[in-house]
Image (cartoon, helix red, strand yellow):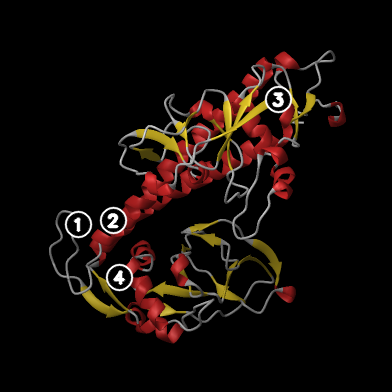
Amino acid sequence: MVEEKKNIPKVRFREFAGDDANAWEQRKLGEIVEWSKGSGLSKDALNIQGIGVPVIHYADLYKFNSVQKEVIHWTMNDIGTKIPENNLLFPMSDVTPDGLARTSTVLQSNVKAGGDVLIAKLNKDILSTFMSYQINRNKNQILPLVTGTTVRHINSKSLSTLKVTVPGKNEQKYVGSILMRFDSLIALHQRELDNYKMLKKTMLSKMFPKNDEKYPEIRFTGFAYAWELRKLKEILEINPKTEKIPDIFEYVDLGSVVGTDLIKHTKTLKESAPSRAQRLAKKGDVFYQTVRPYQKNNYLYELQYNNYIFSTGYAQLRPYSGVDSNFLLNCVQEEKFVTTVLNFCTGTSYPAINSKDLGRVMIKIPKSTEQQKIGDFFKHLDELITLHQRELESLKTLKKNLLQQMFV
């Protein structure tokens, strides 16, 4: 395997690999760029109505990625510095690890740079798409150059000292292109995920009756009767007694559930298990996060296994006959339910509700047939959310690995 100290990346396109492959050249950023600044547009001069001259303000650089074609602001004054293609843009103020280098290649051609935007004009043999990934992957080299505490600044003199490694222009194009394709896929799945989450939020507000009403705004065909108001303890058992904990079990602690998805569990020995490992799961149980319930990390256990133990940080809700588990899961996700629970909570940093108070919370429920329809609808929606969430995480992980392996 080729050693990295020879300035050759571990992973390389076939066209540029082999025994006679050229090493990447190490340079300082100041050697390959010419610096300029955007003109002094203040935020007060900007609007978000899409009227006037499109302009990038330094704060906008934290809000767009390498596949974004739009800008955030416009100004009615035809001032500002025109941004040519193949330039890098840096925010000079409020510098954070998430807004270091952005390429102008993805912007529409008539965009101008506003105040506190630093423009780096690259040599003709350097591609800004490649260089933005090169710089941003090594954030630890940049952050020590930032000055200030309340407002964090960076300048061209400091940025000029950055060490970068550069291959030939064709290889830069290959590397930049594949990473931009990953960014496009990530952006696509993020949009899909956001859309499904918004759809779920909207439907939760419309498929459950509002405060003083007995009928939901949106309903499946064939259902017309009023929903019934019940205390939670009247329709389910809270924290049923666990007769025997297995000697070896899969432990689910707080943090193991994100949204309605179980993301991890840990094989644990009973003799060394934490004292909070007490709730033996049964198919159909809903585990409700009683600590910081506003996070809405609640899980419906549908596995066939009888060796999953949940933390006492969850309330174990076992529905009585005639109560659908999927419907119940979405009842406790609904915003009105969460607000009611928070009113019963004690504590500030870690608000929590006890099982007795949880049982007193009132909810509205329809007949079991309508519960099943609603439960199945949201179950399918949760599956789509989980699918896109996992795909998004997988793509981000793969991109992170490529950034580690394809650069020197």
Going 27% across and 57% down the picture, which residue do you hit? 373
Q: Secondary structure at mark 4?
A: loop
Q: Earlier in the sequence, mark 4 or mark 2?
A: 2
Q: Secondary structure at mark 1?
A: loop
Q: Amino acid at mark 1?
A: Ile
Are there few (<14), some (14-19), or many (20+) residues within 10 Å of tag 2? Answer: some
Q: Earlier in the sequence, mark 1 or mark 4?
A: 1
* Location of residue 294 in the rendering, given as x and y in whole percent from the top left corner: 44, 69
Going 62% across and 32% down the picture, which residue do you hit? 132
Q: Mark 1 touching mark 2, by CB under 8 A? A: yes
Q: Earlier in the sequence, mark 3 or mark 2?
A: 3
Q: Amino acid at mark 3?
A: Ile
Label for residue 32?
A: 3
Going 13% across and 67% down the picture, which residue do you hit? 225
Q: Earlier in the sequence, mark 1 or mark 3?
A: 3
Disc 2: which residue: 203
- What is the spatial separation of the Cα atoms under label 4 and label 2, in whole angstroms? 23 Å
Q: Residue furthest bottom?
A: 356
Label for residue 218?
A: 1
Q: Is residue 273 above or below residue 176?
A: below
